[in-house]
Image: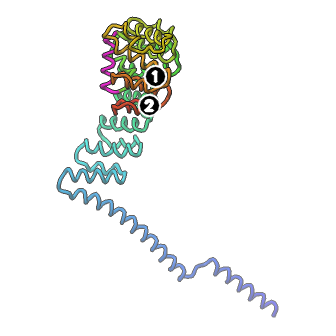
């Protein structure tokens, strides 16, 4: 009797173990149905998304007017960030603009590979590298884009690295970059040795590199300084003299620049407190009075950190240059707001930041 019960218990235990690991046919069917429902739901979602994308593109392609159709495709590509859609545009320049927009938005030069044209590819890569300030990407470009890209990057850093200027193959851009570096370093570190690296020959283009980068302003002022036989090197010494109040720097200037430099110190060292720029510049030839008065006013502005001195300059070109120099010297971007010309003002904000 005892042995029989034991056997029965063993049999029941084995049955229970078997039930716990073996599904019934009904359970299996339920699981199969659930799995099939999940797969169907996923497939339906994917199909719906695919159909929506396809129908959106088909909707664009169904537009009769070619320009409207192209606009629709371009907008769809931009909205979805899908550069492959750009390939449906009929004109190469449209495809380029479409891919460029997406590549720039995502900051991805790799997307430029959707462009088959070598020229358009380089333009796309340049624009993306430039807009994202990607120096490494700039260095992978072909000329002329490589030089333009490195120059643009150098300008965004206020020409603080001479090594970048030396990487630029384009002679004009390389010179502008290098001269800007030496001039800004002279003012920033108050070190006249940087001025000695600037050209000491009269050249309106070279001196315009040192001025706020507004096309009309820099060309006009460059021509005027050149007409007065002021070289980029002497301009650098003169501006540094104004900032440091170091009269010994006048010895590095000659001609008109030396005339103005000494006139400034005559005014500042005078015991007569009523002395002004008119008194200082009376002995200067009439053709030079405007630049003499500008130099006096700008030197006072720099000495006193007083923008109102700049605002008293009648010549707009000189006034803007005075404000820019003062803003740069004291790192006060708020001074740039006094420049009325929008382009010159933008150049001032860019240079001071």
User: Residue 131 versus residue 73: which sits nearer the camera?
Assistant: 131
Residue mark closest to the camera, 1 vs 2: 1
From mark 1 to mark 2, how far is it between C-alphas?
12 Å
Q: Which mark is residue 301?
A: 1
Query: Picture coordinates of residue 57 (x, y %)?
Result: 28, 57
Q: Name the chief secondary structure element in magenta.
A: helix
The figure's colour scheme reads rainbow
Label 2 Cα neighbours within 10 Å, binned few <14 / some 14-19 / many ≥20: many
Label 2 residue SS: helix
> What mark, if any, has residue 253 been given in the picture?
none
106, 314: nearer the viewer: 314
The answer to whether the residues at label 1 and label 2 have Cβ atoms under 8 Å apart is: no
Asked if residue 170 shows in the view, the reply is no
* 59 or 45: nearer the viewer: 59
Residue at image mark 2: 335
Q: Which residues are magenta?
A: 214-228
Give the image location of residue 220, x and y in percent. 30, 20
Quarter where residue 150 is shown: top left
Q: Residue at x 23, y 56 (%)?
A: 61
- The answer to whether residue 70 is left or right of residue 198 is left
Relative to 317, residue 9 above or below: below
> Which quadrant of the rendered structure holds the N terminus?
bottom right
Disc on the earlier residue, 1 or 2: 1
Q: Quadrant of residue 222?
A: top left
Identity of the residue drawn at 33% across and 35% down: 123
Kind of element beneath mark 1: helix
Q: Which x, y percent locates residue 137?
A: 43, 34
Q: Nearer the viewer, residue 119 or 241?
A: 241
View extreme (left): residue: 64
Residue 115 placed where, x, y %?
31, 42
Residue at image point 26% right, 54% down: 72
Magenta residue check for 169: no
């Amino acid at each position: 009797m005892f042995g029989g019960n034991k056997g029965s218990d063993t049999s029941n235990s084995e049955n229970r173990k078997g039930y716990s690991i073996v599904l019934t046919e009904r359970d299996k069917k339920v699981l199969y149905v659930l799995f099939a429902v999940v797969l169907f739901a996923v497939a339906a979602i994917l199909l719906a998304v695919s159909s929506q994308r396809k129908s959106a593109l088909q909707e664009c392609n169904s537009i009769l007017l070619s320009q409207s159709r192209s606009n629709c495709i371009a907008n769809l590509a931009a909205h979805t960030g899908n550069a492959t859609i750009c390939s449906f545009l009929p004109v190469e320049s449209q495809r380029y603009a479409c891919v460029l927009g997406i590549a720039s938005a995502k900051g991805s030069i790799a997307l430029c590979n959707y462009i088959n044209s070598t020229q358009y590819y380089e333009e796309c890569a340049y624009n993306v590298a430039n807009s994202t300030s990607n120096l490494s990407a700039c260095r992978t470009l072909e000329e002329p884009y490589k030089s333009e890209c490195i120059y643009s990057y150098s300008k965004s850093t206020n020409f603080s690295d001479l090594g970048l200027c030396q990487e630029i193959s384009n002679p004009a851009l390389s010179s502008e970059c290098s001269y800007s570096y030496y001039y800004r370093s002279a003012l920033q570190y108050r070190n006249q040795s940087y001025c000695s690296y600037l050209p000491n020959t009269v050249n309106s283009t070279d001196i315009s590199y040192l001025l706020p980068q507004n096309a009309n302003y820099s060309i006009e002022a460059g021509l005027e300084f050149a007409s007065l036989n002021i070289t980029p090197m002497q301009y650098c010494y003169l501006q540094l003299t104004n900032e440091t109040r170091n009269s010994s720097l006048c010895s590095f200037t000659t001609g008109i620049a030396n005339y103005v430099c000494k006139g400034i110190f005559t005014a500042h060292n005078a015991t007569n407190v009523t002395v002004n720029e008119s008194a200082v510049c009376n002995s200067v030839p009439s053709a030079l009075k405007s630049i003499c008065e500008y130099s006096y006013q700008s030197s006072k502005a720099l000495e006193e950190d007083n923008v109102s001195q700049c605002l008293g300059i009648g010549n707009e070109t000189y006034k803007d240059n005075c404000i820019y120099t003062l803003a740069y010297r004291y790192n006060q971007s708020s001074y740039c707001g006094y420049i009325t010309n929008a382009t010159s003002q933008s150049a001032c904000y860019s240079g001071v930041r």
